[in-house]
Amino acid sequence: MASQQHRVGDTPWIRRTLIASALILTMLMLVIPLVVIFAQALSSGWATFAENIGNEYTLHAIGLTLFVAALTVPLNLVFGTSLAWLVTRFRFPGRKLLITLIDIPFAVSPVVAGLLYLLLYGRNGWVGSWLTEYDIQLMFSWPGIVMVTVFVTCPFVARELIPLMQQQGTEEEEAGVVLGASGWRIFRRITLPNIKWALIYGVVLTNARAVGEFGAVSVVSGNIRGQTNTLPLHVELLYQDYNIVGAFASASLLAAIAILTLVAKAFVEWRQSRPEHPAPEKGGV
Amino acid sequence: MSTTANVSAASGRRFAGRSKRVLPGFGLSLGISLFFVSLVLLLPLTGLVLETSGMSWDQFWFTVTDPRVVESYKVTLLTAFAASIFNGLFGLLLAWVLVRYDFPGKRLVDAVVDLPFALPTAVAGITLVTLFSESGWYGQLLSAVGIEVAFTPVGIVIAMAFTSIPFVVRTVQPVLEELSPADEEAAVSLGATDGRVFRKVIFPSLWPAMVTGVALSFTRSLGEFGAIIFIAGNTPYVSEVTSLMIFMRLQEYDYAAASAIASLVLLVSLVLLFSINLWQGRYLRRLEGH
């Protein structure tokens, strides 16, 4: 009977109203803001856009931002994978606490995150005052930026991997042990192919946040133009100088990274939803 | 071996637990994880404890109850509350539409929902203020009907709502997907109206996920900084959020005052985080128990 198939919200007018309101709100809250970034960046033409990007300080900010991401991502890749392996492959006291602890950066305000590092490693800080004697300055220079970025982005890889690895279980890996494979070989040949896509998305998310972190970096950077200005800080600086088009030119680069992140997510979900398709074995890749 | 079939469920679980230790890498992954968690997460927290404990109680109390700071708590709590309620409704609508219906552009909507997590907050901030300022696309229309958003607390609500849109959608969506149609179809075929079935059959399964999403959205909004400072106008006693107060104390090199306010904010965020995790644990276990 057709009436048995009926589910809540199937009435045409309800359905149309809900879809229309969702689409309108999505346009207003998400799509138009994204369009505005590029419209503003190009509002004085391509030549001005190119000039804004080619500016000495903008180029330096891009370089510093990429440098920070290049240090942060590998560190958090190793940490996230180790932690996911630990909490999904073993039971031990304190396991649940550990899973909660890695969520701290998600709950802590970025400004507080920056403050935590400033207090400890700043000139008058507990560790910082000791380092000052050796002429090592971490805060208000690039190492501080890297440190807070590592803090802010450390949950992403682990958060992507834990649910997946939990769900996949350990049988294949245990079979590997029985067959006498080494730990590294088991990880590379059995675990890695299974978690590859989630791992890639975790890295993409880590990278997106590392490139875009503002609050925490703002606290420890010192905002020295051409020295400790990352791209998001550069956006703020230009905006406060009333160089709106310049600010949006830099912002459009960050927005482009955000769009790539969304595309990567859609791609990873598409790969994961496809029926089992053993990927061709390519050892070294 | 037929005897293994007699093993009770409990000892079976224990056996499975022990067999997990068969896998290599316990020492190495424990070492890396503990080293990292201690150095990156826990050690910095001790810095704040040390700094705050260096203050006298009077000094601490004086700092955190400064009238301007107290006003910032009110502004932050109220705007975060409004933003997360908005996201609760908007998130439910989006999750429902994405799970239940097919329509052109569905995949695009699904993808763009995550934009606020991918877009740097400073970029969100300058974009929203540009849209809502008097000469902006939205600001022009709104000021025609006498609504001011930019440089008011309403602007703060918008910035907070934007940065935490994905939370409710992404917590409700999977629950809605796994909801079995049987109860719902039975209720509908017995002649119950859509509204009644939604309230009596569907909503009871959805609300724990909704609460989780709204709580995550609220936590995030309490700490938000980058997206807010551009649109808030930062008028003392009117549109200053607490994270801005901490930031201002830091710029004055008043680390003690910044730490005092920050320790309060941190305490609230940690309590929220642990409550959400407990809540999710309880709720998920109930689901698995079925």
Image: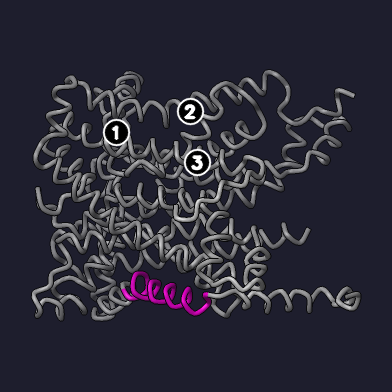
Quarter-of-image position of residue A28:
top left
Residue A56 on the magenta segment: no
Q: Mark 3, chain letter?
A: B
Inter-mark Cα distance, 2 to 1 = 17 Å
Discs 2 and 1 share one subunit: no
Discs 1 and 3 share one subunit: yes
Discs 2 and 3 share one subunit: no
Mark 2 neighbour density, 10 Å: few (under 14) some (14–19) many (20 or more): some
Mark 1 neighbour density, 10 Å: few (under 14) some (14–19) many (20 or more): many
Q: Classify mark 1: helix, strand or loop.
A: helix
Q: Mark 2, chain letter?
A: A
Q: Position of residue B225 (x, y in %)?
A: 30, 50
Q: Height in image: B25 above or below A219?
A: below
Residue placed most toward the observer, A133 or B205: A133
> Which residue matches tag 2?
A25
> Which residue matches tag 3?
B87
Q: Quadrant of the N terminus of chain B?
A: bottom right
Residue sitting at 23 percent across and 27 percent down? A41
Q: Classify mark 2: helix, strand or loop.
A: helix
Quarter-of-image position of residue A275:
top right
Q: Earlier in the sequence, mark 1 or mark 3?
A: 3
Q: Quadrant of the C terminus of chain B?
A: bottom right
Seen in the image, is B202 located left or right of residue A47?
right
Regarding residue A209, the answer to whether it shows in the image is: yes
> Which residue matches tag 1?
B127
* Amino acid identity at mark 3: Asn
The range drawn in magenta is B25-43
Contact between labelled residues 3 and 1, with CB atoms less than 8 Å apart: no
